[in-house]
Image (spheres, coloured by chain):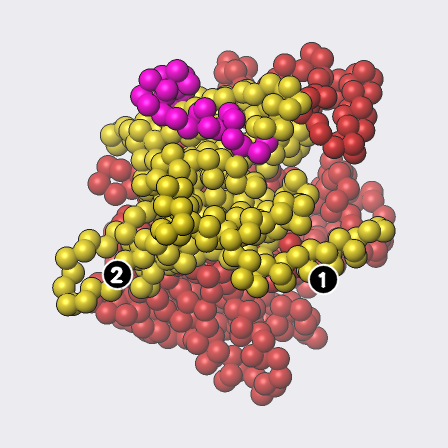
Amino acid sequence: MTLPFQCIEAYSLPTERSCEWAVFGVCGSRLVVQTSSGVTSTWPTEQYPTRSTEPADEPEGPPGKRVKLSPPADQIMNFSCLTLSNGKEHIVAITAEDKCIRVFRLDSENQLQQLSQRCMARRPCALAITSDDSTILCADKFGDVYSLPLQYTPEDDMTETPIPEESETPAEKDYKPAASVLTVHSGRNRKVLEEQMKQASKGVKKSKEPLKFKHELLLGHVSMLTDIAYARIDERSYILTADRDEHIRVSRGPPQAHIIEGFCQGHDEFVTKLCLPTPGVLVSGGGDPHLYIWDWVNSRLLNKFCIRDAVSAFMKTLTEDKSNLEDKISKTVVSGIWNVPATSTQDVILVACEGVPAVFSISLGGTNGPPVLGQTIPLTGNALDVGIISQNKEFCTAIVSIDNIHKPGSTTEIREDEGPNRLQCFSCKGNEWHEDSDVMAKLEWLNRRALGDEGDSGTDSKVTSQSPRRADEKALRDILYGMENLRKRPGAED
Amino acid sequence: MPGEPAKRTKREEYKSTLGEGQDAQLPKKKFYRQRAHANPFSDHSLTYPKCPADMDWASLYPAYVVEEPQDGSHDQKEISEGKGNAITKQVEIADIGCGFGGLLFALAPKLPDTLILGMEIRTSVTEYVQDKVRALRAQHTPTTNASTHDFQNVSCIRANTMKFLPNFFTRAQLSKIFLCFPDPHFKQRKHKARIVSYTLASEYAYVLRPGGIVYTITDVEDLHNWMVGHFEKHPSFEMVGEEELEKEGDVCVGIMRKETEEGKKVERNKGMKFVACFRRAEDPPWP
């Protein structure tokens, strides 16, 4: 049994005669890569040797509860995000459970090497890298965006004084409640104040240890951030941030990230993805029926495209069982938007939705027309992520990560037999996408063998014996399909 | 809890009498009391416009509704082009966390030509202010007491401004923001819920015009230091002294000290009041 890749990324370096590329995938807590020359690498090479001593029977109890406990030191951490630097030298990834930002690179032998790991105070949700590849912008679950230098060595900490996160009045010599008898008015609050005074006399409570590496708070929303993008237009740099409260904010880039330039307002539901296909154009999607296309520099809506209609039309051809199909369609969530490098005169994007076994190719139509659905590409399983290899100016290949565990069209039902492929490849010629068996053949290792049973070496089989596939179904579902959970439930609380 | 049902019935009874031609009667505060805290992070079932242009200002400020041009010509300059809900002036002053509206009703006669909006997250407190606005407007009729203020320039809405401030106001729309006696959120782990932070200061700067002022007042010294620290750190704000503002003819600080409900309570308890004001600086040129 093999688990699907929750995220994939690809890069290509077209040379005069051919094209070198590499496809990265993350599967649970492991990062793998395969290059066009056939070299493969896995990180970490050996998975948690300490864990092998653990009993195989993990408690079957409700999985939700364990999360709340303080995580053990060797807790499994799963990758949740993968980004390539603009120069394609570095791969920056987030591991969710330990809130860690990890920087990797391929060394001269094309082997994965972790350069740094930095654990943030809050769980990072999305990453962007500045155009000069100097800085990582990290958007977190608390709504804040931090900047960290991409290049990092632990020795830096010795020379640089850590920047305090916030001016949180570090004068903690003697804890004194901020409230006083004068500011507290109700009886119950007075009692609380007395309690606090009592606590204070017992001794100083240790506050959270500040982060030891260089990081700077740039901006923040009072809502969970879902995506971040960095853009440069005419020497001006911008940060775009999207949150769960329908907001898309446009701020200036560092060092003026405290200045808000505008908001792209119009979404009715949470925003999950931002994509900048051409300078000045933003495509955003989320829990809304529509994708929104913006002239984001001027906070102006250019067009909308009803992705829910496209999903609906496709899902109706897919299944005979029309029961609860409407409900499913009404919960359509955009899980990814990718820009297809110019293949023709038109700008084309690929769009995926959670639990939908298809990728939608949409022509944006530029300034002189509405966006048009070019093609619905059916898949053998739900689309999870897309990486794009640009072979040359006219020809590119989309590597789609497929959910081979859940039934196509469902995020909950498990297949009886594991799906055949974890990847599917499509090449775009003209404006048509066709399955590409050449690239697929080259990616055979990544598709079927990486981290799988068919592993050839001893280490590999050891890996599978304890690979994350033991993780229960819910844990897997949480890794693959977290976005629908962002929808607000009306009247849940007041 | 014993007494709860009686309280609810009394409130319902009271509110049902409000509709019966008692417009001019001032609401009674005791029927509107509500717990002093609200969680700004939760998904309250709030209503808010998608963007400022969608905001229905006309129902809040009916005296300022744009008259339909009778001859079809557009000689009147429309400032906000909503959906037929345009008003001739824009809101310029926001009292964030207005509570029972003491400051609003004191400011309104002092700044009769400026639209003032109170924003409060607690439903029933918001209702109190809205009922009071209605009563004060009804009390004022040109025939009986033309000398009193008509309170057409003040209104109140329920809103979570920490999340949705830019849904109500456009860039540089406001000239003044009041943050009076905000919830101190004493516990360290609740500090993120404070109405002032470095990151929220960016939003205040966005809706304020250059030269606009943020006024803060609190009786909690620690919170005062916190607010000063965060605004001072923000490059878009510089602190201004009270005296300097008074010299400029600004009457707001005095009113804020004396007229806010919380300010009066602190006065009675002989507590301390800490005031800090910050001026919105011009945005620097792009680097």
Q: Is residue A99 visible?
A: yes
> Which sits in the foreground, A240 or A159?
A240
Q: Mark 1 = which residue?
A: A473
Chain with colour red in the figure: A
Which chain is disc 1 placed on?
Answer: A
Q: Secondary structure at mark 2?
A: loop
Q: CA distance from mark 1 to mark 2?
A: 62 Å
The image quarter containing residue A478 is bottom right
Q: Chain of mark 2?
A: B
Question: Which residue is depicted at the point 52% across and 37% down?
Answer: B102
Mark number displayed over residue B67? 2
Relative to residue B48, is residue B57 drawn left or right?
Answer: left
From the top left corner, tell me how far across and down residue A355 is, in percent.
56, 68
Mark 2 and mark 1 in contact (Cβ < 8 Å)? no
Any magenta on residue B258? yes
Provide the residue span drawn in magenta.
Answer: B234-262
